[in-house]
Amino acid sequence: SSEEADSRHHLFVTLDMLVEFHTTFLYSEVEGIWSEQHLAPALEALAQKYEAMPADENLRDERSLDIIFTLGARLLRDRKAASSQALRQLWLQLGGLLRDRWGSYDPDFQDLCATLGGQPRPSPTVEEVAETLKTVRGC
């Protein structure tokens, strides 16, 4: 129904804002400080978003994980991170979504592979993304 679609849209906008808030504070450009405690709430908001998606959602245009992997790789290059295992696990499970969108030969994708632990598995389903985010967010 139209009302259901409208409600889902507003939920997604709200969850995207939460992810943006937490990823903004994951790394402070001004202070040059990493605040890893913002990773778990960002992943939790993403898990809620994927749980609310229809099972047949086309994930090719869904870019909400891009910032997690981009900042996660930067974090791992900058310092020894407490969240390094969780970031690598996420990459190996979900990074196939970026490969499908960016291409396996894209230099930025290759950089993420080198930093986050190799080639990710094939692209997951919506349900697999939600489950992985719920599992890893507790790490």
Image: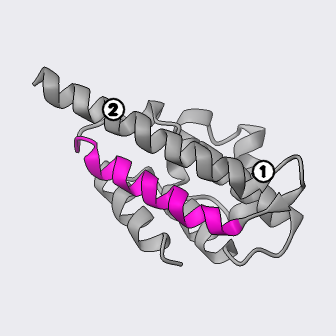
Residue at disc 1, secondary structure: helix
Q: Quadrant of residue 79?
A: bottom right
Residue at disc 2, secondary structure: helix
Q: Residue at x 62, y 58 (%)?
A: 119
Q: Residue at x 78, y 40 (%)?
A: 107
Mark 2: which amino acid? His
Question: What's drawn in magenta, residue-wise?
Answer: 36-55
Q: Considering the image in quadrants, where does the C terminus appear?
A: bottom right
Mark 1 closeness class: few <14, some 14–19, many ≥20 residues within 10 Å? few
Q: Considering the image in quadrants, where does the N terminus appear?
A: top left
Query: Disc 2 marks which residue?
Result: 10
Check whether the beta carbons of the residues at disc 1 and disc 2 lie within 8 A of each other.
no
Q: CA distance from mark 1 to mark 2?
A: 34 Å
Mark 2 closeness class: few <14, some 14–19, many ≥20 residues within 10 Å? few
Query: Does residue 59 lie above or below 120 as drawn?
Result: above
Q: Tell me the chief SS of the magenta region.
A: helix
- Is 54 magenta? The answer is yes
Residue 92 showing in the rendered view:
no
- Is 88 magenta? The answer is no
Mark 1: which amino acid? Asp
**Residue 80 percent across, percent down from the top left:** 82, 76
Query: Disc 1 marks which residue?
Result: 111
* 16 or 56: nearer the viewer: 16
Residue lying furthest top in this view? 2
**Residue 69 percent across, percent down from the top left:** 65, 53
Task: Indicate left or right for 70 with 74 as reference.
Answer: left
Query: Does residue 22 lie above or below 14 as drawn?
Result: below
